[in-house]
Image (cartoon, rainbow, N blue to C red):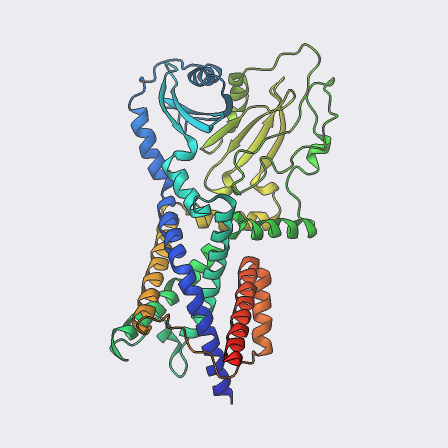
């Protein structure tokens, strides 16, 4: 009886694994290819910047102040607004990046620090690595594409779980999971099966981890995660600070405090929302003049932020300057808000200011990006991506060789249609932990019931 139950369960899991695999394979390959390319974004963009810098004037003596560099960018695109300044990564870097926003979106300009000339000008969204990132995150289809990616990533996780169950050896040594016997079984399909199973055994846990830590970027899971943290009382840094934030000017108007977007500058991973507004407020007495950007940078220079360092201008009449390290390693990130009237520091958000859950997830996100421990992390990520491609190819070949000509080759339904209570509980748990997988599974079950009902009606009518 136990053997029969196990066989029934295996057939059912095999069918789920089969259908999920056919659905996921094309998307898994796309995500693996784009992810493996994006791992090496730092090296790629450093090479591009080196080419641009080769056209810059040699640094000699004083460079132009930051305000003049921003004005040079604005002069190249009349009607645009200043969005962000990316500081040089090193003192010897001859250019700065200035991001402007116009009716067509963001543009990135590389400006010579000595002459103020624009050396390169491109649409930010069209930069190669940004396009790769958009394909990886949304398939170039916006929010709808992002939902598709979330569905596929969720089912990839389920594929790993069901694959482990199907591949786990029964009646032989456990280590055969990693080193199966080749040369046994009927033909090449058995070889493809063993390569598929062995590949999954070697890199399954790694891919599973990378997928899990990619979920905070997603729409449904990410939003649920944020709400769960709120219910657990896990606050973002600054939620209390904004209420008592004081400008250094005692006559400043603080009436707007308590209404700002507390997440601005506090998040440890990008959620694809674009360039968030920083609405921390400062104020000044009537007639006061805001400080130039260069003065703010001189005040912040002792900080020695880890590059890349972004500078965002004040938003609104009483906004503040924000300087943020966007270092790939999350523990090195820091965000500081400066009073536009006095240059005084108003707020500082460090990695250690975040709650323990966010710090843990942020480290996982950095691992997903290949940024947690340098080039070695990039190599690990590349191995995982190549492993996903291997599993996709071998899984597709197994199906192609097994399927009858002209038919899908669906694994047979088990004769016992009943589902064990434990399995139902597992399905419900997976549906709650991976909501988009749960929704699509429910939709598939409804469609299956409707098709089966229609088939029975046709047979009855005949």
Where in the figure is residue 91, as x and y percent of width and height? 39, 24
In the rendered image, the vertical position of residue 248 relative to residue 202, given as above or below: above
Residue farthest front in this picture: 462
Instruction: Tally the numbered discs.
Output: 0
- Please tell me which residue lies in front, 399 or 175: 399
What percent of the width, then of the height, locates residue 102?
49, 24
> Can I make out residue 378 in this image?
no
Horizontal arrangement in the rendering, residue 430 relative to residue 375 (left or right): right
Residue 440 location, x and y as percent?
53, 61
- Which residue is more in the foreground, 145 or 312? 145
Residue 195 found in image quarter: bottom left
Q: Is residue 241 visible?
A: yes
**Furthest residue to the top?**
287
Q: With respect to residue 443, does 379 lie above or below?
A: above
Residue at 66% x, 26% y is 281
Specify the farthest residue to the bottom. 1
Residue in the image at 53% along x and 18% along y: 293
Residue name at image x 52 percent, y 65 percent: 444
Most foreground residue, 418 or 239 = 418
Q: Is residue 257 rendered to the left or right of residue 305?
A: right
Where is residue 127 shown, x and y percent of the image?
38, 34
Q: Describe residue 381's horizontal placement relative to residue 306 as left or right.
A: left
């Amino acid at each position: 009886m136990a053997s029969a139950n196990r066989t029934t369960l295996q057939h059912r899991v095999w069918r789920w694994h089969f259908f999920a695999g056919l659905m996921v394979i094309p998307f898994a390959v796309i995500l693996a290819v784009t992810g493996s390319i994006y791992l090496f974004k730092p090296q790629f963009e450093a090479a591009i910047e080196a080419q641009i810098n080769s056209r810059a004037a040699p640094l000699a003596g004083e460079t132009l102040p930051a305000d003049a560099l921003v004005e040079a960018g604005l002069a190249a695109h009349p009607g645009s607004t200043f969005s962000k300044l990316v500081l040089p990564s090193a003192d010897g870097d001859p250019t700065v990046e200035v991001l402007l926003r116009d009716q067509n979106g963001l543009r990135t300009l590389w400006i010579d620090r000595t002459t103020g000339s624009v050396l390169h000008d491109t649409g930010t969204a069209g930069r190669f690595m940004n396009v790769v990132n958009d394909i990886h995150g949304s398939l170039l289809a916006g929010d709808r594409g992002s939902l598709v990616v979330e569905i596929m990533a969720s089912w990839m996780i389920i594929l790993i779980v069901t694959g482990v169950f199907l591949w786990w050896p029964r009646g032989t040594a456990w280590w055969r999971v990693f080193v199966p016997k080749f040369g046994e079984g009927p033909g090449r399909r058995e070889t493809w099966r063993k390569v598929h199973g062995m590949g999954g055994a070697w890199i399954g846990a790694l891919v599973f981890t990378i997928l899990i830590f990619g979920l905070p970027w997603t729409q449904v899971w990410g939003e649920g995660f944020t709400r769960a943290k709120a219910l657990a009382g896990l606050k973002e840094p600054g939620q209390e600070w904004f209420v008592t934030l004081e400008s250094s000017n005692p006559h400043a108007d603080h009436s707007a405090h308590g209404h700002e977007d507390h997440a601005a500058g506090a998040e440890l991973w990008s959620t694809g929302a674009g360039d968030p507004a920083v609405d921390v407020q400062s104020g000044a007495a009537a007639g006061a003049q805001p400080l130039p950007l260069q003065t703010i940078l001189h005040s912040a220079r002792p900080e020695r932020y880890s590059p890349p360092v972004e500078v965002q201008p004040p938003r609104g009449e009483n906004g503040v300057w924000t300087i943020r390290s966007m270092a790939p390693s999350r523990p090195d990130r820091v965000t500081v808000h400066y009073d536009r009237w006095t240059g005084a520091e108003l707020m500082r958000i460090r990695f250690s200011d975040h709650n323990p859950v966010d710090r843990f997830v942020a480290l996982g996100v950095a691992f997903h990006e290949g940024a947690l421990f340098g080039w070695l992390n990039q190599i690990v990520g590349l191995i995982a991506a190549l492993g996903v491609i291997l599993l996709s190819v071998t899984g597709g070949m197994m199906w192609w060789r097994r399927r009858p000509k002209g038919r899908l080759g669906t694994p047979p339904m088990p004769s016992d249609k009943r589902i064990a209570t434990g399995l139902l509980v597992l399905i419900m748990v997976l549906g709650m932990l991976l909501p988009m997988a749960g929704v699509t599974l429910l939709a598939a079950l409804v469609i299956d019931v409707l098709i089966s009902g229609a088939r029975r009606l046709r047979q009855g009518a005949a």
